[in-house]
Amino acid sequence: MNTIKKAAGVLAGVVALALILLVAAGGCVGSGTGVSQDLQAPADGKDQAPLPTEALPAPTPDETQVEEGYALPAIVPAEAPGQETMTRAFPTKFEKKTYTIEIDVNGSVYDGARNVDRRWPVSASWDDPAVMTAYYRRYIEDPAMEVFFDDLTRPFRYIKAADGLNDEEYLELLITFVQQIPYDADAPSEPRYPVEVIGNMKGDCDEKSLLLLGMLAHEGYDTALLLFPGEHHAAAGIGITVNGNPSFRVFESTDRGKYFYIESTGPTYIGRYTEPFGSAEAKVVPLGDGTKRFDRVNYVTRITGIYQKIDDRLPFMNARMEEWRGEIEDLKESLTHGTYETREEWDRDHREYTDLIMQHNDYVQKFNRYIEVRAYIADHPYDMAGVYRYIQNSNVEDITI
């Protein structure tokens, strides 16, 4: 009967484990229903600049003069920065290793970025993707950012060469690095530049998304800015090679291709998102001219499919075991203290009692195995290939209930 009690103890971890993936897959909209305050326009209209009434061209990376309230002015590197160079170190888990990635931050670019007037366009501009595109693109396409991204990607290129990473693995390294940068719950309402995120060693959802987009575009990946006007939200997208029907929403551009959502807030599998982003209206704005894509769509589909299958089965299994425990306790009471007219009747109840215990204990083993695999999937989003192999070796797909 010790095994019977075991399932109840194991079940206590189910709710906590459910929260693990929710947090891992969560974004700026933590509840799945609210809107990120980081991406909304300031409540005080006096601090907002008016939109121009005439049609304006989208800003280009070498543009130095832009309309106030439509896109950001160019960064002017500081002539006398507080520090010429700042070195920042980030511990980053990737696959089976933990790296300490040291990044040299150009002090002139960092101080220049901090001095840019980055006020939001008026809130109505969310209805015009060109306005928000111009605003956001400036964060990663400003000429001064090229210097920063050159410095930023240098240690990653070293890791790629030293560890023999292919383009797919390198992509996952860059993504998981940004996801593991500490989240800043007290970030200002207007986004900070990628150079500030690295310099400050923290950022919120839109800031980390802009950092990630800049890194991926710089390294030749097919990336896109995903705008959700109704939610006042922007996120990063990565081009995908699609075979079959992925289990996640695919975001399509009119002139480039298809993209998966990348959650930058914390370690999360590529393609995962919280609601309402699975159904909300989205505008897809390709960035850069990269051609490299995310090809392991089948990996993430299988991993998250197994996770969902386990999630669907655990409540049923728990309810079934509770039912059996009640029947077992009733039979035990009857067999111990009840009155039987014949030994045959007692033997019949005893066989039923024994069979129920065997069925229950078989479910306990399967339940515990599901919990183990579920926790491993939730805890290792930075090791997609390793999780894929773990699932194959676990034989979890062979479990029947």
Image (spheres, rainbow, N blue to C red):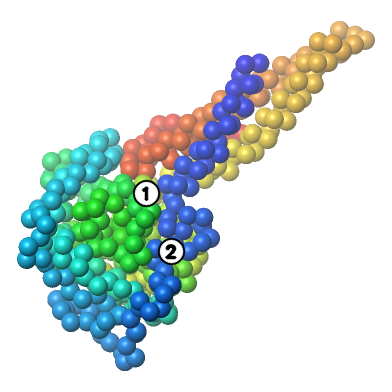
**Residue under label 2:** 37
**381, 88: nearer the viewer:** 88
- Looking at the picture, does residue 192 appear above or below residue 199? below
Q: Is residue 141 visible?
A: no
The residue sitting at 80% across, 16% down in the picture is 333
Residue 47: where, in percent of width, then height? 35, 76
Check whether the beta carbons of the residues at disc 2 and disc 1 lie within 8 A of each other: no
Q: Is residue 222 visible?
A: yes
Horizontal side of residue 344 vs 208, given as left or right:
right
Residue 12: where, in percent of width, then height? 58, 32
**48, 340: nearer the viewer:** 48
Horizontal side of residue 321 vs 76, given as left or right:
right
Which secondary structure lies at badge 1?
loop
**Residue under label 1:** 266
The residue sitting at 15% across, 79% down in the picture is 64
Q: Amino acid at mark 1?
A: Gly
Q: Amino acid at mark 2?
A: Gln
Residue 70: where, in percent of width, then height? 30, 80
Indicate the quadrant containing the N terminus: top left, top right, bottom left or bottom right: top right
